[in-house]
Every structure is written in C-alpha cells, then in structure tokens.
Image (cartoon, rainbow, N blue to C red):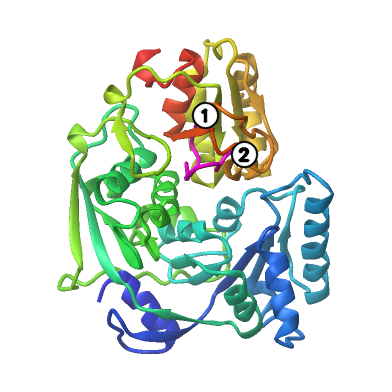
Amino acid sequence: MTITEKLLARAAGRDAVKPGEFVSCKLDLVLANDITAPIAIDEFRNMGADGVFDPKKVALVCDHSTPNRNIEAATQTKKVREFAREMGIPNYWEADQGGIEHIILPDKGLVIPGDVVIGADSHTCTYGALGAFSTGVGSTDAAAGMALGECWFRVPETIEVIYSGELQPWVCGKDLILKLIGEIGVAGARYRALEFKGAVIENLGMAGRFTICNMAIEAGAKNGVVAPDATTLQWVEGRSEREPVVFGSDDDASYFRTVEIDCNVLEPQVAFPHLPENTKGISEVGDVPIDQVVIGACTNGRLEDLREAAKVLEDRHVADGIRCIVIPGSQEIHLQATREGLVEKFLQAGCLVSTPTCGPCLGMHMGVLAEGERAIATTNRNFVGRMGHPKSEVYLASPAVAAASAVAGKIAGPADV
C-alpha cells in the first residue's frame, strides 16, 4: 500500500484498503475556523448533538477575520468562542496567543505523524507534511466529525511526485509546488493523493514541506503527504505527549501516475492570474508592475519564510508607491521574528507588519485590492476577486520573489535586485 492507504486503513481499523473503497475512519482532530465553524455549530445543533466526541480532539481557530474587522466578524468569533467554552474545548484560539490555523496546529503538537484529520478549510491538507492524512471538508462534515469522531472517505489513488537533483539558489518549497501545478493543472490530481518524494524532499526542511502540502488542494488533490523521516521526527519531538506513528509506502505500492521534476534546472516560479496553474519561470515573466506585496499566509508565514524575505529586503527599501505587507503566521513566530531583528528590518525597508491573520489572502482585510490593482503574494490562490475587486490581479510566488518585487516595484527575482 501507499502511505495514504496505510493511514486510512489504520484509522478504519482494517489491515488493508485499496483505491475506490469507501471507509469510515476514526478522527484524531477536527478543525474549523471563524468562517466555517459558525455553520458547523448550527448543523451540530440541528443534528441534536449535545457534546463533542472528545474536547481535546476539536480545534477552533479564529484567523480569517481576526482581529475582528467589523461587527459581523466579531459576532462570528463570539459564536465560536462561546461554543468552545460550552463544550469545554481547550484548543481555541483567536488573536491572543493564536495565529493562522494551519501553522499553529502543527506547531502546538495537535497533529503528528499517523494522524487522520479533517478541517472545515481546504488547506487542511497542509498537515500531510508530517506524514498524516489531512483533508478539507464542508462545515456539515465538520459538524458530524465533532459529534461522532468519524468521517467517511473514498480511498484515493496516489500520484507519486519525485523531485530530483538539487535546489538552485532562491528556489524553495513554493517553487516546487507551483512547478507541479503548472505541469499537471488545477484538476490534475482531482480526488487523488499527492505523495512528494525524492532527493530534494529528503533534504528539504519542514517549512518547505508544509508549503508544498498546503497547496496540494490547488492541484485538486484530496491530500498531500510526505513520508516521515528523521527531519520530521526531530521537528515533532517535544510538541506532543502522543507517540508518532510512522508509515511509508511499500516498494511494490501501486501509483496512478508518476511525475518527475528535475530541480537542477528549476528557477523561481510565478503563477499568473487567474489560476495557480498559469506558472512561468522568473526569467519568462517580463515587465509586470505591481501595487502591493503580501508576504505570509498559511502557505508562507513561517519563520523560515520571513528570514528569506528579510534577507532580500535588508539594506534595501520598498519602491515608491508599493505597499508591502508582512504577516507572521502566529504570535510565537511574530515574537521570534522580533527577537531576531527581522521585524526591524521589515520596518526599516518600508514594510507594514501585521498581527497574524489570513486577512488579505481571501480579500477579507489588511490589504484588499481596488479595481485595476495588482499584487504579488506568497498566498495560495489567485482566482478572480480572491484578494479584492474582481478586476484586480494576484500573482503567486515565494517570499524571496515577493520581497524582490517589493524593491523593484515590479515582479522580479532576488538576483534582479
């Protein structure tokens, strides 16, 4: 079996499963946020549930519109906060010691290798970087998961993605996943598992692995996954009292397809509007002026991402007329970035540094675009109207490319500045 099949088999209490089978799995964690949890709470009530299956296995993170951007957002957050208190759910965060859900849940040890996780947010697939099965669901499925501690799945076929060679300067996890999506398209892995492997993945840190798995959904995948190794186990050590369960694919596992990407010739990538599959190498971009830069989000808001951006921005300044917004992924990351002097470098370069929030990624707040404006961002989606006005444009790139673009006033790579 593949690692995905093994994860689902264990959670279903079976020795084996195969693609196409329907299984009911025990859940290790159910997640919802300030946009999706209020709907899930209503459905939870409607089904007559009077308590969650395990308060410690439910996480509610208010991150999309917090700090609350308006009365409606405040009302949504209040509803989630009160539900968490009523149900005795300890894993509730908003603006205080929280952050962006897909960053803080692994950091706080709520997801470890071997887990099966559902979340009422499509980027729940991020946790596959730890060797877990994690996927996004609708609010109704999240409500049922909170009540029952189970969810049904159709076992997906697996696409094997092999990254060979060595990473070139300024190429990172974001470029690896953008290149893949450019190769197979936004529907290229629809309801299939993406299993990332190869020499480059083996040498990649956890931040890069989280980024890659975060955007598996942008290829239509059910989940993305990296088999746990020494890097994974060292990262999770001390974060949880639970013991990791490590799976890897068998040598004779059956794959739906194999995609190979040679990283010896891979340059930084940029996804053009209005789909993540519209990728070009930085040398092919041409002259694309911008109005705004966003560095952060659940895709690239980790400390390692901020370090890369600061490396480019140090002793340089954001171009006139450009708004460069930096959003640390959590309060802890913000604090550490301050201790390391990264925040000072951002401010000296003319950036705006925000509290942790999803904010501009989905056009909520902290950087909404007006008609005709153009942004380059380290976020994960560039659909029509994603960051604001339907006639605005969003380009996707790595922290290094985003930072270089802020300096250049147009889309540019670090080597250009």
Q: Which residue is mark 2?
A: 360
Towards the viewer: 370 or 62 = 370
Crowding at mark 1 (Cα within 10 Å: few <14, some 14-19, many 20+) = many
Q: Is residue 380 magenta?
A: yes
Q: Residue at x 34, y 38 (%)?
A: 175
Whole-number angstrom distance, CA of label 2 to CA of label 1: 10 Å
Q: Is residue 340 visible?
A: no
Which segment is the magenta one? Answer: 376-387
Question: Which residue is found at the position 42% from the left and 72% from the top?
Answer: 245
Residue type at numbered disc 1: Ala
- Compare residues 22 and 150 and report the one nearer the observer: 22
What is the x, y in percent for residue 228?
Answer: 36, 61
User: Quick check: marks 2 and 1 in contact, CB under 8 Å?
Assistant: yes
Picture coordinates of residue 126, whole percent (x, y): 47, 56
Front residue of 159/8: it is 159
Q: Which image quadrant for residue 249? A: bottom left
In-image side of 211 versus 339 (left or right):
left
Q: Amino acid at mark 2?
A: Pro
**Quadrant of residue 205 in the image?**
top left
Q: Position of residue 368 (x, y in %)?
A: 64, 34
Label 2 secondary element: helix
Is 70 located above or below residue 141 in the figure? above
Residue identifier under label 1: 375
Mark closer to the chain start, 2 or 1: 2
Q: Main secondary structure of the magenta part?
A: loop
Report whether 107 appears left or right of 46.
Answer: left
Could you tell me which residue is drawn at 60 percent across and 53 percent down?
104
Q: Residues within 10 Å of mark 2 (few under 14, many from 20)?
A: many
Question: Can residue 268 be seen here?
Answer: yes
Quadrant of the snapshot with the C terminus: top left
